Protein backbone atom coordinates (compact mmCIF):
# COMPACT_ATOMS: atom_id res chain seq x y z
CA UNK A 1 0.00 0.00 0.00
CA UNK A 2 1.48 3.40 -1.00
CA UNK A 3 2.16 6.39 1.19
CA UNK A 4 -0.96 8.05 2.46
CA UNK A 5 -3.07 4.99 1.83
CA UNK A 6 -6.19 4.79 3.91
CA UNK A 7 -5.77 2.12 6.56
CA UNK A 8 -9.06 2.49 8.27
CA UNK A 9 -12.48 3.87 7.70
CA UNK A 10 -15.80 3.57 9.38
CA UNK A 11 -19.09 5.12 10.38
CA UNK A 12 -21.20 7.15 8.02
CA UNK A 13 -18.46 7.56 5.41
CA UNK A 14 -18.18 3.80 5.22
CA UNK A 15 -21.71 3.62 3.99
CA UNK A 16 -21.96 6.56 1.65
CA UNK A 17 -18.59 6.58 -0.11
CA UNK A 18 -16.91 4.23 -2.54
CA UNK A 19 -13.37 3.52 -1.46
CA UNK A 20 -10.31 2.93 -3.58
CA UNK A 21 -9.62 -0.69 -4.34
CA UNK A 22 -7.91 -2.65 -1.59
CA UNK A 23 -9.11 -0.39 1.21
CA UNK A 24 -10.56 -2.24 4.15
CA UNK A 25 -12.25 -0.94 7.26
CA UNK A 26 -10.11 -1.73 10.30
CA UNK A 27 -11.46 0.94 12.61
CA UNK A 28 -15.19 0.41 12.77
CA UNK A 29 -17.17 2.69 15.03
CA UNK A 30 -14.33 5.16 15.73
CA UNK A 31 -14.97 8.14 13.48
CA UNK A 32 -13.69 8.99 10.05
CA UNK A 33 -11.04 7.63 7.71
CA UNK A 34 -7.51 7.28 9.10
CA UNK A 35 -4.29 7.39 7.10
CA UNK A 36 -1.14 5.38 7.70
CA UNK A 37 0.51 6.93 10.76
CA UNK A 38 -2.83 7.43 12.47
CA UNK A 39 -3.64 10.93 11.16
CA UNK A 40 -7.21 11.65 10.19
CA UNK A 41 -7.69 12.05 6.46
CA UNK A 42 -8.65 15.46 5.13
CA UNK A 43 -11.12 15.92 2.31
CA UNK A 44 -8.33 16.85 -0.09
CA UNK A 45 -6.33 13.73 0.81
CA UNK A 46 -9.36 11.59 0.20
CA UNK A 47 -10.11 13.23 -3.13
CA UNK A 48 -6.55 12.55 -4.29
CA UNK A 49 -6.82 8.93 -3.22
CA UNK A 50 -10.07 8.58 -5.07
CA UNK A 51 -8.55 9.92 -8.24
CA UNK A 52 -5.78 7.32 -7.89
CA UNK A 53 -7.93 4.48 -6.79
CA UNK A 54 -10.66 4.74 -9.35
CA UNK A 55 -14.33 5.07 -8.67
CA UNK A 56 -16.50 2.27 -7.45
CA UNK A 57 -15.14 -1.01 -6.13
CA UNK A 58 -18.40 -2.84 -6.61
CA UNK A 59 -21.07 -3.59 -9.16
CA UNK A 60 -24.03 -1.25 -9.43
CA UNK A 61 -26.50 -4.15 -9.61
CA UNK A 62 -28.86 -2.39 -12.00
CA UNK A 63 -32.53 -3.13 -11.40
CA UNK A 64 -33.71 -4.29 -14.81
CA UNK A 65 -32.94 -5.60 -18.30
CA UNK A 66 -31.81 -2.84 -20.63
CA UNK A 67 -33.73 -4.38 -23.54
CA UNK A 68 -37.03 -5.77 -22.19
CA UNK A 69 -37.17 -3.97 -18.83
CA UNK A 70 -37.69 -7.21 -16.93
CA UNK A 71 -36.91 -6.69 -13.21
CA UNK A 72 -33.53 -8.14 -12.21
CA UNK A 73 -33.31 -7.87 -8.41
CA UNK A 74 -29.89 -8.36 -6.77
CA UNK A 75 -30.66 -12.03 -6.06
CA UNK A 76 -31.78 -12.79 -9.61
CA UNK A 77 -29.93 -15.66 -11.28
CA UNK A 78 -31.09 -14.41 -14.68
CA UNK A 79 -29.04 -11.20 -14.77
CA UNK A 80 -26.17 -11.09 -17.26
CA UNK A 81 -23.53 -8.36 -17.44
CA UNK A 82 -20.71 -7.30 -19.74
CA UNK A 83 -17.43 -5.82 -18.47
CA UNK A 84 -19.05 -2.35 -18.41
CA UNK A 85 -21.99 -3.74 -16.49
CA UNK A 86 -24.48 -3.35 -19.32
CA UNK A 87 -27.22 -5.49 -17.80
CA UNK A 88 -29.64 -7.78 -19.62
CA UNK A 89 -31.78 -10.81 -18.75
CA UNK A 90 -30.61 -14.29 -19.79
CA UNK A 91 -33.44 -14.56 -22.34
CA UNK A 92 -32.48 -11.38 -24.16
CA UNK A 93 -28.79 -12.30 -24.13
CA UNK A 94 -29.53 -15.70 -25.65
CA UNK A 95 -32.27 -14.85 -28.12
CA UNK A 96 -32.01 -11.16 -28.96
CA UNK A 97 -28.34 -10.31 -28.45
CA UNK A 98 -26.88 -13.75 -29.27
CA UNK A 99 -24.29 -13.26 -26.58
CA UNK A 100 -22.95 -9.96 -27.92
CA UNK A 101 -23.31 -6.72 -25.95
CA UNK A 102 -24.80 -4.03 -28.22
CA UNK A 103 -22.92 -1.29 -26.37
CA UNK A 104 -19.37 -2.67 -26.37
CA UNK A 105 -19.42 -5.66 -28.72
CA UNK A 106 -18.04 -8.12 -26.15
CA UNK A 107 -19.64 -10.96 -24.22
CA UNK A 108 -21.60 -11.52 -21.02
CA UNK A 109 -21.23 -13.43 -17.77
CA UNK A 110 -23.82 -14.23 -15.08
CA UNK A 111 -24.03 -11.42 -12.53
CA UNK A 112 -22.94 -12.51 -9.04
CA UNK A 113 -25.28 -12.28 -6.07
CA UNK A 114 -24.69 -9.80 -3.22
CA UNK A 115 -25.97 -11.02 0.13
CA UNK A 116 -28.97 -9.11 1.52
CA UNK A 117 -27.39 -8.92 4.98
CA UNK A 118 -24.78 -10.60 7.13
CA UNK A 119 -22.03 -10.13 4.56
CA UNK A 120 -18.41 -10.37 5.75
CA UNK A 121 -17.29 -6.94 7.09
CA UNK A 122 -20.70 -5.46 6.22
CA UNK A 123 -20.19 -6.18 2.53
CA UNK A 124 -23.85 -6.74 1.78
CA UNK A 125 -26.91 -5.01 0.35
CA UNK A 126 -27.82 -3.44 3.67
CA UNK A 127 -24.58 -1.41 3.52
CA UNK A 128 -24.02 -1.29 -0.24
CA UNK A 129 -27.47 -1.16 -1.78
CA UNK A 130 -28.21 -2.07 -5.38
CA UNK A 131 -28.69 0.70 -7.92
CA UNK A 132 -32.25 1.87 -8.45
CA UNK A 133 -31.28 3.69 -11.63
CA UNK A 134 -33.10 1.86 -14.40
CA UNK A 135 -31.44 1.76 -17.82
CA UNK A 136 -33.99 1.08 -20.55
CA UNK A 137 -32.47 1.23 -24.01
CA UNK A 138 -34.08 -1.41 -26.25
CA UNK A 139 -31.74 -2.77 -28.90
CA UNK A 140 -32.35 -1.75 -32.51
CA UNK A 141 -32.62 -5.13 -34.29
CA UNK A 142 -31.13 -3.86 -37.56
CA UNK A 143 -28.16 -2.27 -35.88
CA UNK A 144 -27.57 -5.36 -33.79
CA UNK A 145 -27.77 -7.65 -36.84
CA UNK A 146 -25.12 -5.47 -38.49
CA UNK A 147 -22.90 -5.75 -35.40
CA UNK A 148 -23.28 -9.54 -35.34
CA UNK A 149 -22.46 -9.78 -39.06
CA UNK A 150 -19.42 -7.59 -38.61
CA UNK A 151 -18.15 -9.74 -35.75
CA UNK A 152 -18.71 -12.92 -37.74
CA UNK A 153 -16.78 -11.48 -40.68
CA UNK A 154 -13.83 -10.52 -38.49
CA UNK A 155 -13.80 -13.78 -36.51
ZN1 LIG B 1 -34.49 -8.84 -21.22
ZN1 LIG C 1 -21.20 -3.83 -22.90
Image (cartoon, rainbow, N blue to C red):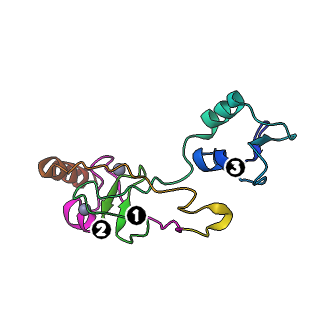
> Does dot 3 land on a helix, a strand or a loop?
helix
Q: Main secondary structure of the magenta part?
A: loop
Left or right, residue 48 beside residue 134: right
Instruction: Give the magenta-colored segment's residue range.
Output: 91-116
Q: Is residue 48 above or below residue 93?
A: above
Spot occupied by residue 18 in the image (x, y as percentages of width and height): 59, 45
Residue behind mark 3: 11
User: Which residue appears at 20% of the width and 51% of the height?
Assistant: 138
Tell me, yes or no, whether the two marked residues, 2 and 1, touch with CB atoms within 8 Å.
no
How many numbered marks, from 0 up? 3
> Does dot 2 land on a helix, a strand or a loop?
helix
Task: Look at the image and tell me in which quarter the N terminus lies.
Answer: top right
Is residue 1 visible in the rendered image? The answer is no
Quadrant observed for ligand 1 in the rendered image? bottom left
Q: Nearer the viewer, mark 1 or mark 3?
A: 3
Residue behind mark 2: 90
Tell me, yes or no, whether the two marked residues, 1 and 3, touch with CB atoms within 8 Å.
no
Spot occupied by residue 117 in the image (x, y as percentages of width and height): 57, 68
**Mark 2 burial class by Cα count in 10 Å: few <14, some 14-19, many 20+:** many
Amino acid sequence: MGEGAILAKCGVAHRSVSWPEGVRCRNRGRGGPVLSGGRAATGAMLKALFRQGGRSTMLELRPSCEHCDKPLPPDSTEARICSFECTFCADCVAHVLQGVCPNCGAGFVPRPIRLASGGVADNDLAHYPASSKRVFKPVDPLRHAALLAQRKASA
